[in-house]
Amino acid sequence: MEKLPGYDPDVKKSRAEAQNIMRSLGYGPDNRLNVKIMTRNLPDFRDPAAIASDQLTNIWIDSELELVETANFLPRLIRSDFVLALTAIGSGLDDPDQNFYENYICDSKRNYTRYCDREVDSLIDRQSVENDLNKRRELVWGIDRRLQEEVVRPILYYMRKATCWSPTFKGLKLQVNSIYNGWRMEDVWLDR
């Protein structure tokens, strides 16, 4: 994993490599790149965008956050009306199919970067029907490695979410592979 872009624990080395790339493109301390980072105007989006903006200054990219209200954010993503965008992607299921089909195949409406590689689409189909868990895992890891090496949609952070319980809240049945599904409130009650 440490060989993938962005995962090397040696931050100074990674930053120096990024600075060399920027220099090769004509940028440096005296010739900085200015960009806007479009993101949704909510803390779960703003905070990581602000951190990313701060980190980009180390490689001579000055960015301004463009905070977009929720009603306008998704339409702008779908239209590709951005240069850089930070979005928090949540998956309703803990299964590669949802993430791959929703975010990376050529014809997906949520493939905001417009990445298209029919060979990757074929690999995604292949992993989806693979019955052998170990073979599927290897296929998934291979697809993930390829997407990261091609810097298709860089993953900047992993947000952790949780569900809280109260001893008096009874009858809630949560699914083991998602905190977002299985919320059937007609079966819950307060035991007080």
Image: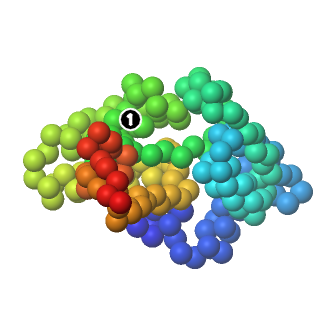
Query: Which residue occupies the extreme left position in the image?
Result: 131
| Helix, strand or loop at mark 1 | helix
Which residue is found at the position 38% from the left and 63% from the top? 166
Q: Depth check: give the residue in front, 148 or 24.
A: 148
Q: Is residue 116 above or below residue 27?
A: above
Q: How crowded is mark 1: few (under 14 residues within 10 Å), some or many (20 or more)?
A: some
Identify residue for label 1.
102
Which residue is found at the position 45% from the left and 46% from the top? 90
Q: In this view, does 103 lie above or below 140?
A: above
Q: In this view, does 58 lie to the left or right of 157?
A: right
The picture places residue 7, in percent across and down from the top left corner, at 50, 66
Q: In this view, does 152 lie to the left or right of 70?
A: left
Q: What residue type is labelled 1?
A: Glu
The picture places residue 149, in percent across and down from the top left corner, at 45, 53
The picture places residue 185, in percent across and down from the top left corner, at 33, 42
Which residue is found at the position 68% from the left and 69% from the top? 16
In the picture, which quadrant includes the C terminus? bottom left
Q: How many labels does the image show?
A: 1
The picture places residue 113, in percent across and down from the top left corner, at 53, 35
In the picture, which quadrant includes the N terminus? bottom left
| Residue 49 seen anywhere in this rendered image of the structure | no
Which residue is found at the position 66% from the left and 61% from the top? 18
Q: Residue 51: which quarter of the image?
A: bottom right
Query: Which residue occupies the extreme right position in the image?
Result: 30
- Way the structure is coloured: rainbow
Q: Depth check: give the residue in front, 71 or 185.
A: 185
| Residue 154 seen anywhere in this rendered image of the structure | yes
Q: In this view, does 150 lie above or below 161?
A: above
Q: In this view, does 88 lie to the left or right of 184?
A: right
Q: Depth check: give the residue in front, 18 or 161.
A: 161
Query: Which residue occupies the extreme front position in the image?
Result: 192
Q: Depth check: give the residue in front, 175 or 84.
A: 175
